Image: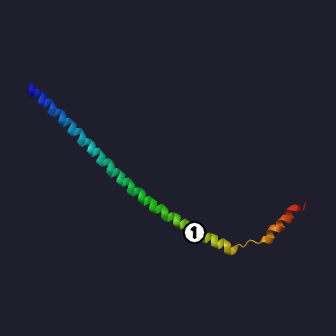
């Protein structure tokens, strides 16, 4: 009878060890997938940062071009007010 109890205990311990091993393999796979996802996100972040910097540079160039071509006069504001008031 003692042998049956010992065999049962050994099988239970083997089952527990197998369960722990499969859980560790699962956690290892999750870790690898998260690291891979993090690398993808870092690459995407760098790409988006570069695109943002390029867009900001382009916007600054456009603002400089607009400011050099179009110089608003304060006299124009008054003339528009006169045109609007003349019915």
Helix, strand or loop for disc 1: helix
Q: Position of residue 64 (x, y in %)?
A: 63, 73
The C terminus - image quarter: bottom right
**Could you say which quadrant of the image residue 24 lies in?**
top left
Left of 54 or right of it: where is 67?
right
The residue that disc 1 covers is 58
Left of 80 or right of it: where is 60?
left
Image height check: is 56 above or below 2? below
**Measuring 24% from the left and 38% from the top, which residue is drawn there?**
19
Q: Report crowding for label 1: few under 14, some 14 to 19, many 20 or more residues within 10 A (C-alpha).
A: few
Q: Position of residue 37 (x, y in %)?
A: 38, 53
**Measuring 88% from the left and 61% from the top, which residue is drawn there?**
85
Left of 69 or right of it: where is 40?
left
Q: Position of residue 14 (x, y in %)?
A: 18, 37
Give the number of marks. 1
**Could you say which quadrant of the image residue 5 lies in?**
top left
**Could you say which quadrant of the image residue 18 lies in?**
top left
**Measuring 15% from the left and 30% from the top, which residue is drawn there?**
8
**Measuring 27% from the left and 42% from the top, which residue is drawn there?**
23
The N terminus - image quarter: top left
Return the residue found at the far front.
2
Return the residue found at the far right.
87
Give whichever of 52, 16 is nearer the camera.
Answer: 16
The colour mode here is rainbow
């Amino acid at each position: 009878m003692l042998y049956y109890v010992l065999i049962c205990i050994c099988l239970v311990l083997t089952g527990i060890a197998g369960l722990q091993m499969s859980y560790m393999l699962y956690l290892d796979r999750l870790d690898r997938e998260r690291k891979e996802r993090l690398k993808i996100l870092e690459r995407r972040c760098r790409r988006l940062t570069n695109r943002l910097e390029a867009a900001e540079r382009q916007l600054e160039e456009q603002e400089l071009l607009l400011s050099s071509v179009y110089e608003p006069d304060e006299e124009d504001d008054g003339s528009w007010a006169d045109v609007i008031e003349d019915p």
